[in-house]
Amino acid sequence: MRIKKYYIVLIIVSFLSATQYVVAQAKRIITLSSAISETVNALGYGKNILATDVTSVWPEEINRLPKVSRNRSFSIESITAYRPDLILVPEGDFSKENLYQFKSLGIRVVTIRQEFSIQGATKFIRQIAAAIGDKARGEQLAQKTESNINTTLSQLKKGSKSPKVLFIYARGVGTMNVAGKGSSIDEIIKLAGGKNAIQEFSDFKPYTTEALIKSNPDVILMFDFGLSSLGGRAAFLDLPGVSYTNAGKNKKIVEMNGPLLINFSNRLPEAIKALNNRIL
Amino acid sequence: MLRVESISYKLNNRPLLKDISFCIRPGEMVALLGANGAGKSTLMRLLSGERKPDSGRIMLYGADIKGYNRKVLATKRAYLQQYNPITMAFSVKEIVMMGRYGFKSLSSAKNDQLALTETMEICGLTDLADRSMLSLSGGEQQRVHLARILAQLWDNKDSVLLLDEPTNNMDIQFQHQTLAIAAAMAKKGYMIIVVLHEVNLAAQYASRIIILKDGRKWWDGTPVQVLTPQHMYTAFGIHAQAYTDQSSLKTIIVPKEIKLDAGKFNTNLKTTQQPVYKLKTIETDELINLQSVKI
Amino acid sequence: MKRTVIYTCLSVGLLVSICFSLALGAMRIPIKEVIDTLTHAMGFSVFSSADHGINEGVIMMIRLPRTLMGVLVGTALGISGAAIQGIFRNPLAEPSLVGISAGASLMAVLIIAFETLLFSSLSQLLGYYLLAFGAFAGAGITAMLVYNLSKINGQANVSTMLLAGIAINAMAGALTGLVTYLADEQKLRSITFWMMGSLGGATWQNVSCLFPFVLIPVVGLPFLAKGLNLFAIGENQAELIGLNPNRIKILVVVLATMAVGASVAVSGIIGFIGLLIPHLTRLLGGVDHRFVLPVSALMGALVLTLADMISRLIVQPIELPIGVVTALMGTPIFLYILIKDKKKLVN
């Protein structure tokens, strides 16, 4: 009975506070992915961010903020302790229970699904801006990003043929995955004028030496921390099978900043340009 | 009154017991003898109701044992099994008390306590009461299980006590103590059936002996009738002599020593060339010589 | 006498740890406010009845359900661990060894993986019940399967049962792996999140769903304590003393899998509690199940509450999966017991 009373009180309280959010702009924000943090920053709300997840490392000043989430492991209370009025989180990172918990605490959580395409990037920016309560600034940034992308695309280097790029996500030799079709990496490779070496499957699947040789990529792409987790360029070239591929023969191993590559938001033009430069 | 009417039992199509009949009256203590695999333990299992005979029936106080309610049967028969392995560190007292579990609702706590104290006393466990079972030797553990079985039937002398090799692992004192307890309880009216390997223990304590061979009952009678050199040879394949103790008039069986030459049954010893060990035996006169030299 | 002391100490310890669990956390909430909020919820107030806003919400909506879930899951794992060890007559037996946890996890993973496909229209609460029942069914089915596999001439052979348990475990593990491999990224996240074991998802809804699944075994299992004691000497001893061994076995398996299945469904696989707690209980006050079952329940609740506190507080602001904490706490003590009692355990 008493619990029920509590429910009623809390529902009323959260309802009242929810109506407030619609009116007021978010002042205290927690951003739980690198793309979200970067976008909120680009919208000019960097000073409103209280805490981020562990992958948010750009721009530099964001590293001064506390990190409250790591690999989808986080504590409700730690996040609540910052008394945020808005939590921006990629769809699926919070379980149903977590969403329910934040709801019962009256904290607004907006889950954002990122689509990996040019339209997806601008949509992402607009969604975040809408969640913060500043659609105008969002529109501005979205349009600027879109025109930047168009400029970048028109200035891309063009090779005789588009190189086959194999992306390996590595966290040590034991855990290596390659990017298939439909993944964020697949899309950025296409945008940068390359061709994903993997056409057989979608999403990320475990790496095998035979699949590497069969796909025979011209370029092998990795995140910078991925390459270092394998022990650097020289160690990677020594891995079984690598020397049989064109990429291995020409030592065409490209390492790039991870957050930039999968940003798919305001930094998409930058990412396309950088990758295009490196693979062609 | 326990009446076994022509029971047979097969396991995986192998006949273990064939057409066994006998009858036990209150106050009798029957020893079940026989070679390994003669069917003694199987018969005990059937008598306890744990297994059902394929044909024939076992009547306990006029009713088929099959028809007994579990709880009622538990007040009329107790069964000490041959192997009672234990993996949890129960104390001696706790194990003995388990004999009373079925009666908690029937008898008073005072009776339970009395049964506990008395059975532990008679089985020489009083000093071990709080020891863990896992810390006891095999013979001591066996005594604990005996006490538990006794506690189960402590209040009811119209009952049958089935003891399958109760003296296993026990030292000679407790072998006798155990059978003496059984014999004394038989005198009070209990029916006792005990499987034994030691023929002389059976001769000393049992009022009646049944000998099984290959799943059949071969002999059934008093120790004097049953324990003869011929029967010993037929049932166990040993040569033995039977005497009668002059003071107690009990039969004593003295088996003849079996003599074997290892070279005859261990062919390895014969084929491989072994160095011949010659022990230097000292003859008596030599010893005298040695001593006299010293002197 | 000694046992009364143990009961009292554990109860007091549990109460104290519940209080600490409610008072401590990443949010710094003054103890006065904690007491105020709790007493207010109970219908009276010690201090002022001022509104404490979000602090009150954190205590009532986050900490209280989480603490209760810790108590319930700990109770369930402790008591069912003790019961399973009793049935198996082996102090090393554990729900996960018999395939109960694997079966529960497989069923829960299947339900999570196909939830949207088949039961998209289910409400949240019904979803929890479905998951709890599914995990219970999975646990029960595997336990029965292992049990029947190991039956020889109508008697369950313990070593065969353990070997069958290992086989079923491997099978269920492989199937779980297959399902996780086939599931899409989104589903995979919730599955892995759930496999790590956490009390972080506690809400009033899933706590109230868990409650009956724990209450029934906690009330029911102690009635089977005598039967479990007799099982320690031999399965047929129960029958010889006038109890029905099959009924005892089936009831114990059903009740234990009910508790384990439901807790796996709400909090994932939290290891070592079911193995460790009965061990500690026996060290404290002997092996009589009339003592071991209720005390394992109490101690399980106490230890899991403490473990959860550690998992929340030790690496702030992030929290450790509770399975990591219980394994870190449990393995050294378990190894110690193993070395100390090596000879005893082998026979």
Image: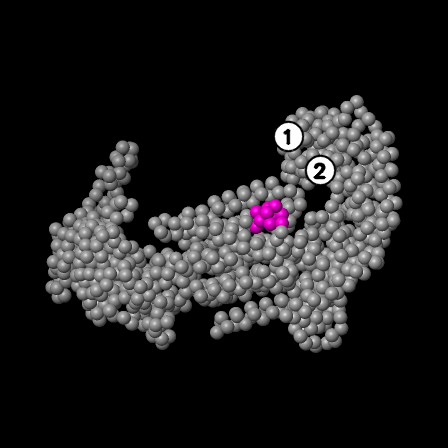
Query: Is the residue under label 1 in contact with that under label 2 (CB below 8 Å)?
Result: no
Q: CA distance from mark 2 to mark 1?
A: 18 Å
The residue lying toward the viewer, choosing from B24 and C342, is: B24
Residue at coordinates 58% horizontally, 60% vertically from top-left?
Answer: C209
Q: Is residue A70 left or right of residue B285?
A: right
Residue matched to label 1: A211
State whether residue C278 appears in this view: no
Residue matched to label 2: A183
Q: Tally the numbered discs.
A: 2
Where in the figure is residue C68, as x and y percent of width and height? 61, 64
Q: Is residue A158 left or right of residue B214?
A: right
Q: Is residue A130 above or below residue A242?
A: below
Q: Is residue C110 above or below residue C28?
A: above
- Does C119 lie within the magenta span? yes
Q: Nearer the viewer, mark 2 or mark 1?
A: 2
Where in the figure is residue A245, as x and y percent of width and height? 69, 26
Residue at coordinates 21% horizontally, 62% vertically from top-left?
Answer: B2
Where in the figure is residue C281, as x and y percent of width and height? 50, 63
Rendered-image quadrant of the N terminus of chain B: bottom left
